[in-house]
């Protein structure tokens, strides 16, 4: 698979081989991501980060990845208010324009398909940092990288996906990335724990079962947590609800607590893309050796370094 010049818009477009290659390169990037060694692999290259939606981890980790590989960054994180989008410039023209300055673009937008629209105008690779509730491929990759670091494989594991299965672009990307791993008789198994009304979309369920994965759905976390190898927690995606009232009935529906974790396997790992709100993940869990969500953030730098180096043809 040749990554050079390619956009990364969705986990859907990545083959198993492409995913394996990204994970392999991310491993090579670890010394630079871990601040142990300096690199000038991307010296002279410019990353533009175009954010139309709030971000802490995704934008900083893309920018850190570029800077630690010797490249430079131009950034606008209030695109709706302070770029020519405000003057009604199209996403297509914005992509055309920014690609005259930058060698690669990372972008986030609240509307599904918006990143693709900008990519159509761009003459340089565009990496999707999240569009609507649909896609967040780079987050999915860093999540599965964290899983791979622990278990060394994906097949045969039981993934407990907890939270807003309807709107979580992170959960959707994770499933799409791991669904084809493992021998046919030991595909990943997904236990989706979501409140009524926030279940995994039907088309995604079909994608997973078509790949040979088993799916179980429940609302009761306590009952199933003992079977998880990976607990992948996600926030109820407040900003995707029609109004505050619609969200309120789900606020705080699940909470990962030390007590709840007493019923989980000792070898399980806990992932969460964060931010954490409404007690979705108690601070007291941070001391649990199974908690990997801060390590997960650091892994994001290695994975994004790999993606930048690959699409820029430097590796
Ligand atoms: C996630 C996102 O933006 O989708 N955060 C992230 O990228 N680390 C998850 C979330 O906001 O709940």
Image: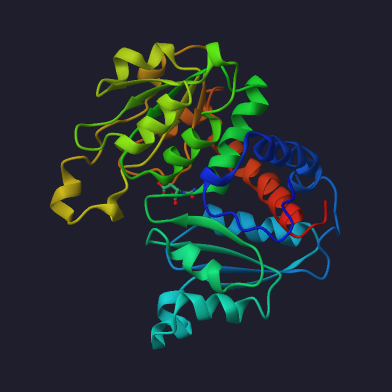
Picture coordinates of residue 257, whole percent (x, y): 37, 25
How is the model colour-coded? rainbow
Q: Viewed as shown, does residue 43 lie left or right of 127?
A: right
Across the whole image, how many numbered discs are drawn on residues? 0
Q: Residue at x 40, y 88 (%)?
A: 87
| Residue for point 38% across, 36% down | 204
Is 90 displayed left or right of 2 in the figure?
left
Task: State the image quarter where residue 232 is shown.
Answer: top left
Residue 106 drawn at (x, y percent): 59, 62
Question: What's the residue at 75%, 43% (across, down)?
Answer: 34
Q: Is residue 83 above or below residue 75?
A: below
Q: Is residue 52 above or below residue 33?
A: below
- Farthest left residue in view: 245
- Please state, as top left, top right, bottom left or bottom right, where the N terminus lies in the image: top right
Most distant residue in the bottom direction: 87
Figure check: 40 above or below 283: below
Q: Residue at x 80, y 40 (%)?
A: 28
Q: Position of residue 101 (x, y in %)?
A: 68, 79
Which quadrant holds residue 24?
Answer: top right
The answer to whether any part of residue 263 appears in the image is no
Q: Is residue 240 left or right of residue 271?
A: left
Give how far across and how far down residue 201 sits, in percent.
31, 38
**Residue closest to the far front:** 210
Q: Can the viewer see residue 207 in this picture?
A: yes
User: In the picture, residue 185 is in which quadrant?
Assistant: top right
């Amino acid at each position: 698979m040749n990554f050079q010049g390619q956009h990364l818009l969705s986990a859907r477009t990545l083959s198993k081989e492409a995913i394996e290659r990204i994970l392999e390169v991310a491993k090579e990037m670890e010394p630079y991501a871990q601040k142990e060694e300096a690199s000038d692999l991307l010296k002279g290259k410019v990353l533009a980060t175009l954010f139309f939606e709030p971000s802490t981890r995704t934008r900083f980790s893309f920018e850190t990845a570029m800077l630690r590989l010797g490249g430079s960054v131009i950034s606008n994180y209030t695109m709706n208010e302070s770029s020519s989008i405000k003057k009604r410039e199209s996403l297509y023209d914005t992509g055309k324009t920014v690609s005259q300055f930058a060698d690669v673009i990372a972008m986030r937008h609240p509307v599904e398909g918006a990143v693709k629209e900008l990519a159509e105008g761009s003459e340089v690779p565009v990496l999707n940092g999240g569009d609507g509730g649909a896609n967040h491929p780079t987050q999915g990759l860093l999540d599965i990288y964290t899983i791979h670091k622990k278990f060394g494989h994906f097949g045969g594991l039981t993934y407990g996906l907890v939270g807003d299965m309807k709107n979580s672009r992170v959960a959707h990307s994770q499933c799409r990335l791991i669904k084809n791993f493992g021998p046919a008789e030991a595909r990943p198994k997904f236990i989706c724990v979501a409140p009524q009304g926030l279940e995994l979309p039907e088309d995604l369920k079909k994608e997973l079962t078509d790949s040979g994965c088993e799916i179980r759905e429940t609302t009761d976390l306590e009952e199933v947590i003992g079977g998880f190898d990976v607990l992948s927690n996600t926030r109820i995606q407040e900003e995707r609800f029609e109004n505050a009232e619609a969200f309120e009935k789900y606020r705080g529906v699940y909470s990962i607590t030390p007590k709840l974790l007493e019923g989980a396997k000792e070898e399980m790992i806990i992932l969460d893309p964060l931010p954490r709100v409404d007690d979705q993940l108690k601070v007291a869990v941070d001391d649990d050796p199974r908690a990997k969500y801060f390590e997960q953030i650091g892994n994001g730098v290695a994975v994004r370094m790999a993606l930048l180096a690959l699409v820029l043809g430097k590796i």
